Every structure is written in C-alpha cells, then in structure tokens.
Amino acid sequence: MNLTKSSNPVFGQSVFSRLDSRTDSGVMTINGTMNKTGLMLLIVTFAALFTWRKFFGVADYSSPEAAFSAISLWMIGGGIGGFITALVTVFRPQNSNVTAPLYAVFEGLFLGGISAFFESMYPGLVMRAVALTLGVFFVMLLLFRNGTLRASGKFKMGILAATGGIALVYFVSFIAGMFGANLEFLHGNSNISIGFSLVVVVIAALNLILDFDFIERGSNTGAPKIMEWYGAFGLMVTLIWLYLEILRLLAKLASRRD
C-alpha cells in the first residue's frame, strides 16, 4: 500500500517529499495521533469558549446582532489565521507540532463566534450539533475498524470528486454573493437546500474514512513521529467541516419550525 496516496488534499503525496525521513524521535503511532487529536479538540474548545462567552456577555445587555459585531474581529482573525496556519502546515509538515495547535486556536475563535450566533437564534442547536458530530465520528471509526468501510481506490476517487464538486459549488456561491446573487438551494430552508446539506454532511463524514486510513497506514509504515501532529491536523480539518455542515443543516430544519 502506498502511504502517499490519499484523496484528502491535506494528505496528498507531496507531503512526504517535503519531510525529512531521517528522525531520532520515533515513529508515528495510532495512539499518539489520537492523543494529539484529543489535545487539539481541547484547544479548539477553550478558544471557542472565549468568543462564546464574549458574545453572550454582550447579548445579555444588547441584541444578538450587536453581540455578533462585538466578536466579528475575533472571528475574522480566527478565520484568516486558521486559513494561513492550515496552508503553512500543509506546505511545512515538519513544523506541524507548532502550526497544528495554532490552527486549533484560530479555528476555535471562529467556531465559538459562529456557534454562539446560531445558539442565540435557535437555543439548544449547538449541543445537538456537537453531539451529532461526535456521534458520526465514532460511528465512522467503528465502521472503519470492523472493515465495513475501507478506503479502496474507487472509494478515494469518488470522495475526491464529490469533495471537489462541493468546494466548487461553495466557491461559485461566494463569487455570486459578491455580485448580489443568492443561491437559494444553498442558504434557504427548502427541501432542495436541506437535501444538499444532507449530501454534504455525508461526504464530510466519509472523508473521515480517508483520514483514518492515512493514520493507520502511516503507523504501519513507520512514518516519522512528527506526522502524528499532521495526522491530527488533517482529522481536525474534517471534523470542523463536518460540525459546521451539521450546524447549518440543523439551523435550516429549525427555521422551518418557526
């Protein structure tokens, strides 16, 4: 099996060409990667609590819109910082022990703000989104461990095509939004919009299989120990995407009940 082949762009084959295979620090293990993933989850949580509390501290005395404005700079900084540190991590995996935790901090600031805003509109929504994200994670891990879902060549190519298609749709939506166009099937609560969100959640969940496969093969082939941080980073990218998509889906469903 070729460790360098993965349809997850974070785990592309050029990663290993930028990594010095000579190391005295040990080799990558599954337990080590899961421990670092857990640490990154804690970092994301604590960073998210900062913007969450700041939002509701303002919202208690004002409106949710004013509270959102009060944390907008933190969210923008988190979003931009997360994007930059993600790029640095991808291009310099040998520094992922520093950049991966920084990515978790920035993403936590962003997620705390966006989660608080959704919570202000639909109380209880965030806890359901968190529970569903963790539930999907453990279900996919179970399916991977018992061999029900494995990252075969065709599976990888299918997920790669689907993920690329979703990215293209979001990019077109972003460009259209700059010209005042609104793609209702993305942002509304119609049956088509909800169906699209369901498809995206499924694709995001299946990306976890690719992450598990990479981590397993990295451990089996003796990848450098620094790749534990890189594997945890890739897993966090997918988990954050999955959480945001579940949050959007639940918000669409909740808006139909109002």
Image (cartoon, rainbow, N blue to C red):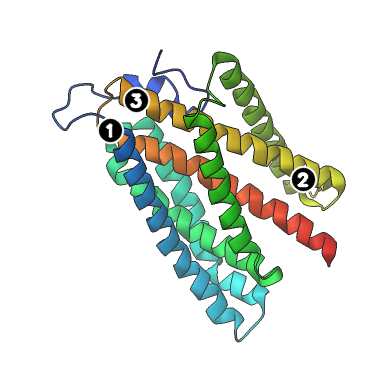
CB atoms at circles 3 and 2 under 8 Å apart?
A: no
Between tags 3 and 2, which lies in front? Answer: 3
The amino acid marked with disc number 3 is Gly
Looking at the rendered structure, which numbered label has been put on residue 94?
1
| Dot 1: element | helix
Q: Amino acid at mark 2?
A: Leu
Residue shown at 55% from the left, 41% from the top: 139
Identify the amino acid type marked 1. Answer: Gln
Q: Residue at x 36, y 36 (%)?
A: 230
Residue 214 location, quadrant: top left
**Along the line of sight, the residue nearer the viewer: 107 or 158:** 158
Whichever of labels 1 and 3 marks the residue nearer the N terminus, that label is 1
Residue 76 position within the rendered picture, expressed as x and y whole percent measured from the top left: 53, 58
Q: Residue furthest toward the front? A: 146
C-alpha gap between disc 3 and disc 2: 37 Å
Residue 96 image point, x, y percent: 32, 39
Q: CA distance from mark 2 to mark 1?
A: 38 Å
Residue 176 placement, left or right of 143 = right
Residue 218 shows which numbered tag?
3
Tell me the residue that label 2 is attached to. Answer: 186
Which part of the image, by quadrant, shows the N terminus?
Answer: top left
